[in-house]
Image (cartoon, grey):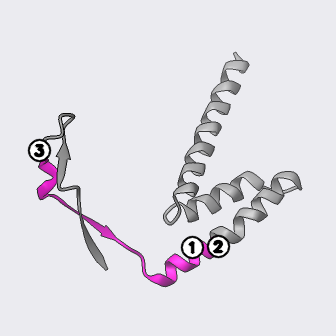
Amino acid sequence: MVAAAPLPHRLFSHAGQCAIAASDYVQVLVKKPNGFVRVAKVTAGLALLPVGVVMIVLPGPGLPVVAASLILLEDEFLWASKARVGMTDLGKRGVEWLRQRAR
């Protein structure tokens, strides 16, 4: 199923005047998964997240499991997307820190 989502119709200048944006005439095609796939992804993500958090303290691959659960959840929840981006940025900064220490 493909749904057309129009972009914002108008842009406002700082003076409060309305200006027509070039994006007025553009539509974005968004392919949405069916309900079963969405429910399965959310269920798997919500089941894996606490398991991953527990495995951070206990033996096991905690961080990869948390990352996988956030990847599953980020299509439905904004907080999961922000957490995954933050986790990725933290990992990149950690790798850079280790490279600088190795010199």
Q: Nearer the viewer, mark 3 or mark 2?
A: 3
Residue at the (73%, 51%) spot, across then down: 63
Q: Are marks 3 and 2 in contact (CB under 8 Å)?
A: no
Neighbours of disc 3 within 10 Å: few (<14), some (14-19), many (20+): few
Which mark sits nearer the N-terminus, 3 or 2?
3
Residue 62 is one of the magenta-drawn residues = no
Seen in the image, is 96 located left or right of residue 56? left
Q: Which residue is mark 2?
A: 44
Q: Which residue is mark 3?
A: 19
Question: What is the three-letter code of the residue carrying label 3?
Answer: Ala
Assign the C terminus to one quadrant of the image: top right
Which mark sits nearer the N-terminus, 1 or 3?
3
Residue 42 is one of the magenta-drawn residues = yes
Residue 40 in the image: state x and y as whole percent.
Answer: 57, 78
What whole-number distance in Å separates the C-alpha atoms at marks 1 and 3? 41 Å
Q: Are marks 2 and 1 in contact (CB under 8 Å)?
A: yes
Q: Disc 3 on helix, strand or loop?
A: strand
Q: Which residues are magenta?
A: 19-44
Neighbours of disc 2 within 10 Å: few (<14), some (14-19), many (20+): some
